[in-house]
Image (tube, helix red, strand yellow):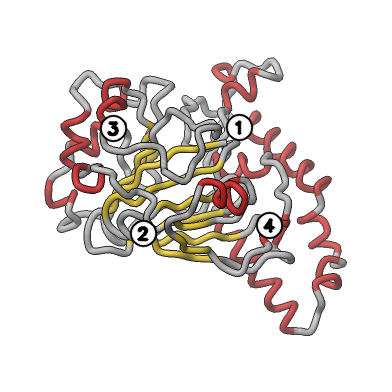
Amino acid sequence: MDLSTYQRRYDLFVRRARALGLSDSEILAIPSVKRVVSPRSRWKTALLVAALVLCVGVVIEVQYVYHVIDLKSTFARVGVDISEIQCVVDNFEFIADMFRPYVDCSVCNITGIDRISNISQREFLRKYAYSGRPVVITDGARGWSALDKFSFEFFKELYVPDSPNLETTDRECQFFPYQTKFESLGEVFNMSEDRRDGVVGEPWYIGWSNCDSSASRVLRQHYTAPYFLTRTMESSKTDWIFMGSPGYGAHLHIDAIDRTSWQAQIKGRKEWTLEPPPECYFECPPLHSTILETGDIFVVETMKWFHKTLIVSNEMSITIGSEFG
């Protein structure tokens, strides 16, 4: 059972309890609910799961997963060589979520996702940059040649045969297959045109972090840091690219990162849905959603909001993003 299933069942329980006339304080007083939401219970559950992970008897190679804890370094800090551990982990993200920091529920003090344009750096800094408040900047990618240049073929030609991005052997190169069966970016670029365009086969959605310095120089010729970010904001040098066919997207998840994300919609239209973390269920509206049009930039703290995406256009979606702090 994945994390979104647990959340849906928990939401259903809360709605039914409220329908019976119970107040939030009365719901929180239920012993089983106390055990779920209490920090002590959360850590106890996390330790039990970690112990289970260490005890299962099949050897696997643990690879890096998008925005999920690096299990190798995590175990190394406590003196455990993960190559000597026999374990099977079916859902890295579920375990990673157990260890994430609790969210200050003041981020929930919003009634929706703002859509604005022509915002000054001063106003962005004051109102959105570090407030946890998600916002869509509708002219965020203004002046970018990426809107005309970026395409499936552009990226396919960008990465030469010996590029580290085409395989998953380089630990600095992250490839995110989501729920597809692709094992590398090289496999993605080798798919047929009909599969690429969604004519045949299953819909697909993938992402990757660019680790090719030559490709990075080309990418940066077609976009700049968003105009609303100040020079004093520390920006990541890593490009994140997400691409997929209509009717697909990323499953519900939360990111194990430290800085706020910005993501620019270069091609197509994509719907984002945000849900509060479990500890904020009684203080936050159940969800928020917005659709990114071509040229929009979405600024959101993906380490605080659970989020999922869905491509809602009839054409391929391409997004490029990074982080700032």
Disc number lying in front (2 or 3): 3
Q: Position of residue 134 (x, y in %)?
A: 55, 56
Please report the residue visible at 17 percent of the width from the left and 50 percent of the height from the top.
195
Query: SS for tag 1?
Result: loop
Residue positioned 64% across, 72% down in the render: 12
Lower position in the chain sequence, tag 4 or tag 3:
3
- Secondary element type, mark 4: helix
Which circle marks residue 56 in the picture?
A: 1
The Cα atoms of the two marked residues, 4 and 1, are separated by 28 Å
**Mark 2 = which residue?**
270
Identified at 57% across, 22% down, the residue is 72
Secondary element at image label 3: helix
Q: Quadrant of residue 81?
A: top right
Residue tagged 3: 219
Left or right relative to 29: residue 75:
left
Chain-order first, disc 4 or disc 1:
1
Separation (CA) of disc 2 from disc 1 = 39 Å
Type of amino acid under label 3: Leu
